[in-house]
Amino acid sequence: GVCYFTHQFEQPVRAVKLNVGDTKMVITTDPFMGVPAAIHIVNVAENREDQTADILQTFGGAGGGEGVEGRINRCLWGPLNHTLLTGGEDSFIRLWDVETGKVSTFAGNEGAGYREGDCIGTGGAKFYYPYGISAVPAGWLVLVADYQNMRIRLLRPFSTTPQPPSPPNM
């Protein structure tokens, strides 16, 4: 293939994911030389000559911001490209509002370890190095590769999201 464009960063790059529609991508960078990890959102131009290195938004990093602790191993766009899910070395899965940058804990509790339970809350689920994150396009089910616990965890992100389709009656 042909190199379409190269984005250069001052920190090691860990994860990248295109949004639905392939118009934006999210890129995570590692902590490096005193600069904390960060999440960057950039446009993806349809035509090569229109592509720029402009960063639309950055969460964390040199600009500060909450919710970025250690390396962010995976990132995932949520339904309608309004949110991001990230999983990292701090054993939390976080939900980011793309417009505001507001971050909340989606899953994980009290640091690394193993415990079954609801996504959050006292006594809730604990993860140990959630390395992979995937979801169905509608966002009603999130899968997490809980690396050190040697498990795949299936999570339902929101109580108000659509339920999976029912199997046909036979």
Image (spheres, helix red, strand yellow):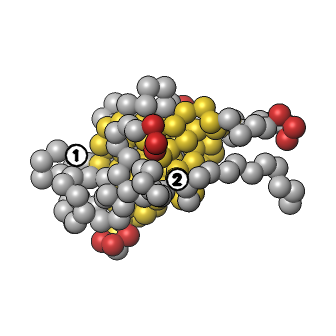
Nearer to us in this view, 27 or 17: 27
Left or right of residue 61: residue 128: left
Q: Residue at x 52, y 50 (%)?
A: 28
Q: How many numbered callouts? A: 2
Which amino acid, mark 1?
Answer: Ile
Left or right of residue 142: residue 43: right
Q: Residue at x 87, y 37 (%)?
A: 49
Q: Quadrant of residue 111?
A: bottom left
Q: Position of residue 14 (x, y in %)?
A: 54, 59
Which amino acid, mark 2?
Answer: Thr
Q: Position of residue 54 (x, y in %)?
A: 68, 35
- Determine which residue is flagged by label 2: 29
> Where is 89 relative to 105, above or below?
below
From this viewpoint, which residue is outermost toward the top? 100
> Helix, strand or loop at disc 1?
loop
- Determine which residue is flagged by label 1: 120
Q: Residue at x 49, y 26 (%)?
A: 99
Q: Quadrant of residue 154?
A: bottom left
